[in-house]
Image (spheres, helix red, strand yellow):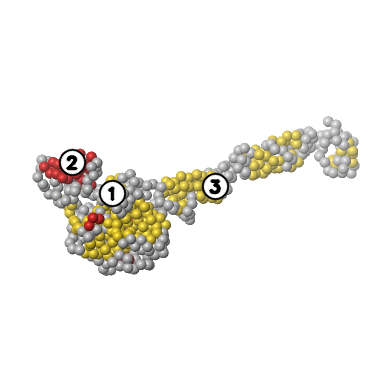
Amino acid sequence: MKRLITLLIIIPLFGMSQTNYELSFNSATLDYVEMPNTSSVIANKTAFSISCWVNPQSNTNHGGIMGFRNNSDADFYLLQMQNTTTIEARFRNSSGANYDILANNILDLGQWQHLAFTYDGSYIRLYKNGVIVNSIAANGTITQSNQSFKLGSLDWQGSGFYLIGKIDEARLWDVALSQTEIQNWMCSEIDASHPNYSNLMGYWNLNEGIGVSTDDQTTNGNNGTILGGTVWQTSSSCLAVVVLCGDVNEDGVVDQTDVTDINNYITGVIVPVFNLWAADVNCDGVINVLDITLLNSFVSGTGTSPLNCCSPMIFGCTDILACNYNSIATIDDSSCIYLDITSFTTSVSCNGGNDGSIVATATGGVLPFQYSLGAGLSQTNGTFLNLSAGTYYIDVTDINGCTSNQTVVITEPPILSISVDSTNETSALNDGSATAIINGGTIPYTYTWNNGGITNALNNLPPGLYTVTVTDNNGCVISGSTFVNAYSATNVINTKNINRTLIKIIDMLGQESFYRRNTPLFYIYDDGTVEKKIIIE
């Protein structure tokens, strides 16, 4: 018993339109669409983009998806590599230099996916479902003005590489679309509200549904001719409004063959056409035996539960913190890429100095990276020198605008301080002392006194000025000094005349001296008398 169910899905994210169509291509009948001389709309321009929805099948040959190609001086295309799910995205400028992105194992066979390829004059970028796949540096322009734009085939030495699969919503721009613009409009038809509407150079929405031509929706009028056995079909991409929940093989009816196809899919049998969204009839995000049971009961008329397909299953990174977060993905495919920062700091050597440093290394994301400290100027490497102590915010941005940040702290040692104490002579026998007390800095310390001493404390010192220079383990230097006073000869009594006063002592060379025991000295008094004597104590 066959039952036909039409499920109208109204999803604000994807927008609404009238019944849409798509084109189905087969390499056996050499199917393709050609828009002659379309390269004229991007000739000599330094930015352009192409995009479409594609549902590819396995192909033993290369399969041209869309773009320009003469393999000489005017290439900008997307190509499915033979016997693989790999995409070649190539830009070849009119100087003959080519720049390639080879995205290995990126295509999902038998499923709709959105591809976009952009060039901004410095880089080419490939996107799948609105998420960056890769980018490389590129330069140059295409000067050719008579190169054809094709869907479903690309030229190769007089023959062609033909696609096996479906295409919908093909677009050509003379601007490099941003990731946000791609994501916001990939499931909506283009209208004047698009921020780059004036840059839309070719738009083939493939909604005619009949005939051997497709109209360019822009004023450029580069209409396409449909060749080979290319077939019109009701659209099943995310722009479609009328869809069949449970119609796994997309033949327009829900029947037992769809039940069989789900079972084959689960058991690993290759299914030529398999719509994942239509197969998830209970909308639990996985295809399993529960879907078989529900669909079988529906087809046989024995069940009471309706089919309940949810929004289209779009695989991608669903983690909002990831660089390649896909806002429209409904199933996480473990493809998330994170921009991480590893950093090492060197502390300031001396308190108040500015010889600290940070070395930051970014991983993940897409090269090249830009590094900056807070609001400082950005640079292409993560080494920052001549920094003082404090808190710093490392910001890293990759080529696609993905950012990451990290907070690091550069420390410094405590302030290096010195206090130098001394004791005076007590008996005129060179028994003074000096001691340096150090705080802060980084231990150990080294000491250098002006009398040659190398310890923090000196003993048996004669009277005089003592200066010490202290160096800590980081090379920080501080100095201090103290004075050791001579023993005062206040107990020297003049027995001959107690009224006179000692005013000066000089040694045998006539130089003024401190009082010394057991040393011949001249004692000069205020009454003009001079005595030479040795005082023994």
124 relative to 292 in the view: left or right: right
What amino acid type is highlighted by mark number 2?
Ile
- What residue sits right under mark 2 in the picture? 292
Asked whether residue 169 is in view, the answer is no
Q: Quadrant of the C terminus?
A: top right
- What residue sits right under mark 3 in the picture? 356
Q: Considering depth in this image, is 155 or 68 the residue closer to the camera?
A: 155
**2 or 1: mark nearer the eye:** 1
Q: Considering depth in this image, is 307 or 384 the residue closer to the camera?
A: 307
What amino acid type is highlighted by mark number 3?
Gly
Could you give the CA–CA distance between mark 2 and mark 3, rounded to whole angstroms? 65 Å
Q: Which callout, 2 or 3, points at the residue further toward the start of the chain?
A: 2
Asked if 293 appears above or below 56 in the picture, the reply is above
- What residue sits right under mark 1 in the picture? 108
Task: Name the residue: 34% across, 46% down.
Answer: 335
Task: Name the residue: 71% across, 41% down.
Answer: 449
Q: Secondary structure at mark 3?
A: strand
Task: Name the residue: 28% across, 64% down.
Answer: 202
